[in-house]
Amino acid sequence: MVGLATAWSLARRGVRVTVIERDRCGGATSAGNAGWVTPGLSHPVPAPGVLLQSLRWMLDPESPFLIRPRLDPRLAEWGLLFARACRRANHRAGLEATYALARSATEAYDLMAADGVAFESHSDGLLYLVCDAGHLDDYARAYDEMARLGFDGRVQLLDRDELTRLEPSVGTAVRGGLLAGAERHVRPETVCSGLVDWLRDAGANVEEQAAVKALVPTGDGWSVRTGSGSMYFDHVVLAAGAWTTQLARSVGVRLPMEAAKGYSVTVPTAGEGPSRPLYLTEAKTAASPFDGALRLAGTLELAGLDLSVNRRRLEAVVRAAGRYVDGLRASATDSAWAGLRPMPADGLPVVGAVASRPGLSLATGHNLLGVTLAPATGEALARSIVDGHDGPELAGLSPDRFVRRRHRVERRRPASVAA
Ligand SMILES: Cc1cc2nc3c(=O)[nH]c(=O)nc-3n(C[C@H](O)[C@H](O)[C@H](O)COP(=O)(O)OP(=O)(O)OC[C@H]3O[C@@H](n4cnc5c(N)ncnc54)[C@H](O)[C@@H]3O)c2cc1C
């Protein structure tokens, strides 16, 4: 979704664009996720207290978090950087940097729709459900912090009676809720297919089943080698999700990023069940109603680039959801899906030009927020590529934050771009 949205933003500015996709556009992590467009959730994952909580979760095989340890110095380095990002001041700086991009997330979706990209979209807010009412204050405080950054979340605390009036399917274990009225959700598959249709209609070149094998600088641009030959571009945007690390490394760009696997199941519905997306807070699970379907999504596993589905953990997601929502007909065998969130060590998206590699930009690392941030990322990066300098919304997200030695380079307007 991030690559497609960037291609859309460039193409609508008159840049000639080619999208090169290894498989089918929108078929990877951007397919089976929960589809939330939630700038109010801009808090980066590395946060004070997260390390201790993760250790507790690791002792429980059905918890929402798992690390499969491996003997890899890169994982160790990632862990150290993650631990540093958990410090209060770093977390706060990360929140500000993420929200600088996220503040235009819903506006960018509106722009995409107004530009003729067709996708399924809902604006019913996000409803947090808690079984322990004591937890509600934590979420309310997080939205207070967002309000101080300028986010108008339209937040409302709800007791059990108010909740059941709003969502009659809420289970008896649920003690209270919080409605964040300004959050939205989309059906992510439709965003990707809508972008592909728009790009093809606009005359962009969309190459599927074309894995990028090598990137070679040519002096005035890049040669991109796929199985069927080489193509030449003034500018390349690497937006290969969790797989970007390998491609970046192949051209000497350091990107400490891990794949954070999550699961979902999607069941058909005939209008029954929740009418708005639910955050099942203690279970760290999302329930998203779409037109004719309900999707449950959750878990975060650091297990490398592995897409296998752990049935036990998926069953735990479905079982946990049953505590919050009555009458759920989902099971772990319903269209089970796994996706890899691209999770940089500091928890922040990686968007912008690579100073040491003229004509190369990265657009990745969106972790839990790739759907939320894809159109805003496309717009910010396209402005940066076309104008030749990053706007303030990209200030804290530069790929160069991982580079030890910095270079200053002149950048120029490209005539053609591969995303
Ligand atoms: C369970 C779950 C729930 C989630 N829920 C939400 C949510 O509610 N809201 C939200 O904002 N985010 C959510 N996310 C996160 C979001 O899904 C991701 O951040 C986002 O999809 C990442 O998009 P991407 O375009 O960077 O990567 P991807 O969608 O993974 O796309 C990368 C593409 O690059 C291609 N590729 C890789 N290597 C090559 C190569 N060598 N050559 C050519 N092509 C290549 C792949 O085939 C793939 O199509 C969720 C994630 C999970 C797992």
Image (cartoon, grey):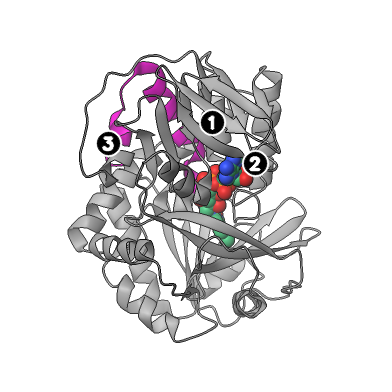
| Residue 122 visible somewhere in the drawing | no
Q: The N terminus lies in which quarter of the figure?
A: top right
Q: CA distance from mark 1 to mark 2?
A: 12 Å
Left or right: 149 in relation to 376: left
Q: Position of residue 258 (x, y in %)?
A: 44, 58
Q: Which residues are magenta?
A: 370-397
Along the viewing direction, whichever of 296 and 129 lies nearer the viewer: 296
Q: Which of the 4 image quarters holds residue 112? A: top right
Amino acid at circle 1: Ala
Amino acid at circle 2: Arg
Amino acid at circle 3: Ala
User: In the rendered image, which residue does mark 1 sit on?
Assistant: 419
Q: Position of residue 65 (x, y in %)?
A: 47, 74
Q: Nearer the viewer, mark 1 or mark 3?
A: 1
Using a 10 Å C-alpha cutoff, classify the residue at mark 3 as few (fewer than 14 neighbours), some (14 to 19) or many (20 or more): some
User: In the rendered image, which residue does mark 2 sit on?
Assistant: 22
Residue 141 included in the magenta stretch of the image = no
From the viewer's perspective, is residue 393 above or below residue 82?
A: above
Q: CA distance from mark 1 to mark 3?
A: 21 Å
User: In the rendered image, which residue does mark 3 sit on?
Assistant: 395
Q: CA distance from mark 3 to mark 2?
A: 30 Å
Task: Give the residue at x 52% y 47%.
Answer: 241
Left or right: 265 in relation to 96: right
Indicate which disc residue 88 carries.
none
| Residue 67 visible somewhere in the drawing | yes
Task: Give the residue at x 38% y 75%.
Answer: 135
Along the viewing direction, whichever of 251 and 23 lies nearer the viewer: 251
From the viewer's perspective, is residue 125 above or below residue 129?
A: above
Task: Report whether the residue tagged 2 is closer than 8 Å to ligand 1.
Answer: yes
Tell whether label 3 touches label 1 (CB within 8 Å). no
